[in-house]
Image (cartoon, helix red, strand yellow):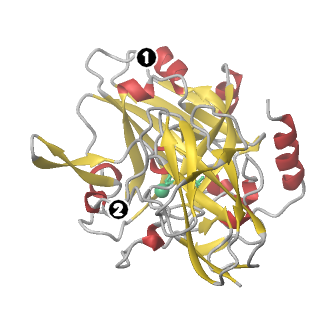
Amino acid sequence: MLTTERQKVTTAIAGAAPFGAGMIIRQKEPVNFEFPFEKLDSFLTPNELFYIRSHFKAPELSADSFQLKVHGAVAKPLTLNYQQLRQLPSETRAVTLECAGNSRVFLVPQVEGAQWALGAVGTAEWTGVPLRILLEQAGLTENACEIVFEGADHGAPKEKPIPPGMVSYARSLPLKKALSPEVLVAYQMNGQEIPEHHGFPVRLIVPGHYGMASVKWLTSIYAVTESFAGYWQTSDYAYWDYLDGKPVRRPLSEVRLKAQIARPSMYEVIPAGSEYLVSGAAWCGEGEVAGVELSTEGREHWTDAEFLDSAQPYAWRRWQFLWHVPQRAGQYTLAARAKDADGKTQPDEHDPNHGTYMINFPLPIDVIVR
Ligand SMILES: Nc1nc2c(c(=O)[nH]1)N[C@H]1C(S)=C(S)[C@@H](COP(=O)(O)O)O[C@H]1N2
Ligand SMILES: [Mo]
């Protein structure tokens, strides 16, 4: 599967610098880099172009001294070194990761947080041990209800409410998802060791959930008997939902349906009367992207685009649409929207209860025809 794609990506990596030309710097330290989405031209995103979202400085870990603990509410706590982990059965799967704050720059009025445009998203082939195997070896006790994943990075978050002292980056998953076969304790990204800023040597990959669930520099897998209410679970990376009419705080989890235009890019000048190949990608969480529609006149009329990639769970599908560019010069607004297998589509507007996350209304891309 995907051998030519893999070759393309691997060739790009051989002897390459850790970051590719055109990466957009949102923050220099800690490293927060964005993929220039208009460069989307392969199903797999090359490692050196894959977006980086890190809250703290990348910890310096070595494969030699690496240890992964599986502990807490388990019958047999485990400590695995890198070699032991690599000897366990492994799987490789293509997974799209999107930061929950991707496209934040499209919110009006402007909001706090990293000003991501379109490129806090990418797809890589991840190789690792299904998490389920580790949890089965350790033997979860009856009362275990969630699994907490902790990275080796830590620091003092700046957004209120500020937790006391230094905190490590930690997120939890409900048992149902943690035991699902697609969740990986990964040690390879596109056939290479996971690069430093993507979590070397080992990270979690949670297909179908926003990026924050895929804990990098993973060193601890801890089963808990009450739901985990850590900083990144309740304060950051959470949103308002309703329970019996009352607002309740919930951790972000499943990725929302979304299509994005890669080309044209914002304010691209397009010759009047030409044929322009509009292209992009679309993705969702647990379901399947079944269609993409494009509007070239301000989200009024929608026409079907065609897919370049077949549907596979947890990975984006690139699409294209041949636009017969009008003769009339002026500014045009393009937008794309996806449909899932149940015919559901994206919301028209951003839901304020989602705060500065889950931005999946059809994003307007303004272009100049002349
Ligand atoms: N340990 C740790 N894991 C982390 C983060 C982090 O800051 N520290 N950031 C999370 C967020 S918000 C996202 S979107 C993804 C980004 O993964 P990437 O940098 O490999 O693209 O990692 C997640 N895992
Ligand atoms: Mo993120």
Mark 1: amino acid = Lys
* Residue 259 to residue 143: above or below: below
Q: Is residue 19 left or right of residue 134?
A: right
Q: Quadrant of residue 173?
A: top left
User: Does the image show residue 177?
Assistant: yes
Point 53% across, 34% down: residue: 288
Mark 2 lies on a secondary structure that is loop
Given residues 162 and 255, the one toward you in this image is 255
- Find the distance from the CA under tag 1 to the CA under tag 2: 46 Å
Image coords of residue 309 (percent x, y): 71, 40
Mark 1 lies on a secondary structure that is loop
Of all residues shown, which one is farthest toward the front?
327
Of all residues shown, which one is farthest toward the left?
245
Image coords of residue 305 (percent x, y): 64, 49
Q: Quadrant of residue 57?
A: bottom right
- Local crowd size for mark 1, using a 10 Å CA cut-off: few (<14), some (14–19), many (≥20): some
Mark 2: amino acid = His
Task: Name the residue that disc number 2 marks.
Answer: 350
* Residue 249 to residue 145: above or below: below
Residue 14: numbered disc: none
Mark 2 or mark 1, which is nearer the start of the sequence?
1
* Quadrant location, the C terminus: bottom right
Point 67% across, 55% down: residue: 196
Given residues 2 and 174, the one toward you in this image is 2
* Residue 149 to residue 295: above or below: above
* Residue 349 to residue 369: above or below: above
Task: Name the residue that disc number 1 marks.
Answer: 76
- Local crowd size for mark 2, using a 10 Å CA cut-off: few (<14), some (14–19), many (≥20): some
Q: Is residue 150 left or right of residue 39?
A: left
